[in-house]
Image (spheres, grey):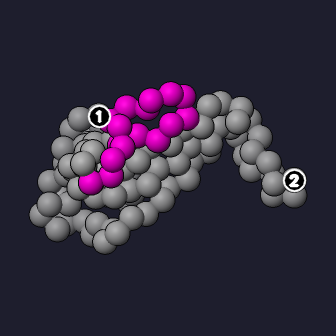
Amino acid sequence: MASGRALKASGKSGQDLIKLREVEAKDGKIKMVEKSATLHILQGNKGWYDVENNKIVNANYRYVVYIPFATQKSTGLSLKPNAPGHPWLMFPGTAGAHIMITPPAGK
């Protein structure tokens, strides 16, 4: 994540960012997880998590499970969601391969 933030700060974005991170991973410049790692994201205008009431406010929840170099064959997952909220494999076969899970808004 730190590498991605540094590349964005240097003006890289989109496909250039993805390609540069792939090269860094394959060259060993950034340490990849050995098994898998999960990233949880709250996204929304002035969104926050209400700890007292265990509730997400003004935000949608999304999460990804990073599995470097995973493929459709190794995971059995589709390469696009089969229905809203279904998991799918994004960037298969790359260092940035991950299972994308985006629950429908408001769920």
Disc 2 marks which residue? 53
Q: Are marks 2 and 1 in contact (CB under 8 Å)?
A: no
Q: Is residue 8 visible?
A: no
88 vs 71, left or right, is right
State the residue lying farthest toward the right.
52
Check the picture and name the quadrant holding the C terminus: top right
Looking at this view, is 52 or 12 the one in front?
Answer: 52
State the residue lying farthest toward the top.
83
For label 1, the SS is helix
- Taken as a whole, is the magenta stretch helix, strand or loop? loop
Looking at this view, is 33 or 29 the one in front?
Answer: 33
In x, y percent, where is residue 25? 20, 60
Region rendered in magenta: 74-89
Q: Residue at x 23, y 35 (%)?
A: 15
The stretch drawn in magenta includes residue 1: no
The stretch drawn in magenta includes residue 80: yes
| Residues at marks 2 and 1, CA–CA distance in whole angstroms | 37 Å
Disc 1 marks which residue? 14
Check the picture and name the quadrant holding the N terminus: bottom left
In x, y percent, where is residue 97? 30, 50
In x, y percent, where is residue 32? 29, 66
Q: Is residue 23 visible?
A: yes
* Quadrant position of residue 69: bottom left
- In the image, residue 82 sits, relative to residue 35, either above or below, namely above
Q: Amino acid at mark 2?
A: Asn
